Image (cartoon, helix red, strand yellow):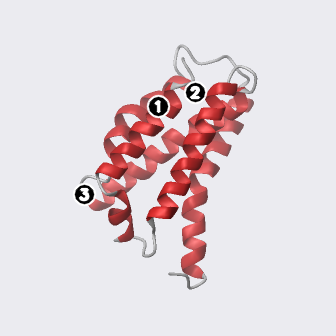
Amino acid sequence: MNPWWVPLAGAAHVAEEVAAGWVVWARRRVPGVTTAQFATVNAAFLGLACLAADQAPAHPFLFFAMSAVLPANAAVHLGAAALDRGYAPGLVTAVFLYIPLGWAVFLGPGARPLAAGFRWEAFAVGFAISATPFLFQLLRLRLGGR
């Protein structure tokens, strides 16, 4: 699989979230979410995804870790849509790009043959990367931030 599919899917996903008003949608659920936070998180992800794609042959761990962000983020969108009983901004690309690409990278027929432990360690790192913005928001709310 061409590693550049990961940042391309990420760009399409961010475009869907922007077009669908993700920040406004998120702010109704978590007070204090800002456009600056959204832009920072997504710029960091896209930058790291591009770096991972560029360095994939030499540094596959980084590529696997950034690829794991896709199914982790898809799970968040699916959960949010289930809770809302409707559309959550980013859901379409999460389902039709993130889940298939996550499968292709980790389990698909073209998946790079790597030791299972290495693959799942990278998967865990990717999920941790995906969870970090949520954990910071939770911490901010717990500390009384707005």
Q: Could you tell me residue 56's position as x and y percent?
A: 67, 24
**Mark before the other along the chain sequence, 1 or 2:** 1
Residue at the (59%, 48%) spot, across then down: 44
Question: Does any portion of residue 102 appear in the rendered image?
Answer: no
Residue at the (32%, 63%) spot, across then down: 25
- Work out which quarter of the rendered image holds the N terminus and state it: top right
In this rendering, the answer to whether 85 lies above or below 103 is below
Q: CA distance from mark 3 to mark 1?
A: 28 Å
Q: Amino acid at mark 2?
A: Phe
**Mark before the other along the chain sequence, 3 or 1:** 1
Residue at the (71%, 21%) spot, across then down: 114
Residue mark closest to the camera, 3 vs 1: 1
Q: Amino acid at mark 1?
A: Leu
Q: Secondary structure at mark 1?
A: helix
Q: Secondary structure at mark 3?
A: loop
Asked if the residues shown at circle 2 and circle 3 are in contact, with their CB atoms under 8 angstroms apart, the answer is no
Where is mark 1, residue-wise? 8
Where is mark 3, residue-wise? 85
Q: Secondary structure at mark 2?
A: helix
Where is mark 2, residue-wise? 106
Which quadrant of the figure has residue 74?
A: top left
Q: Could you tell me residue 39's position as x and y percent?
A: 49, 55
Q: Is 129 left or right of 21, judged from the image as shown?
A: right
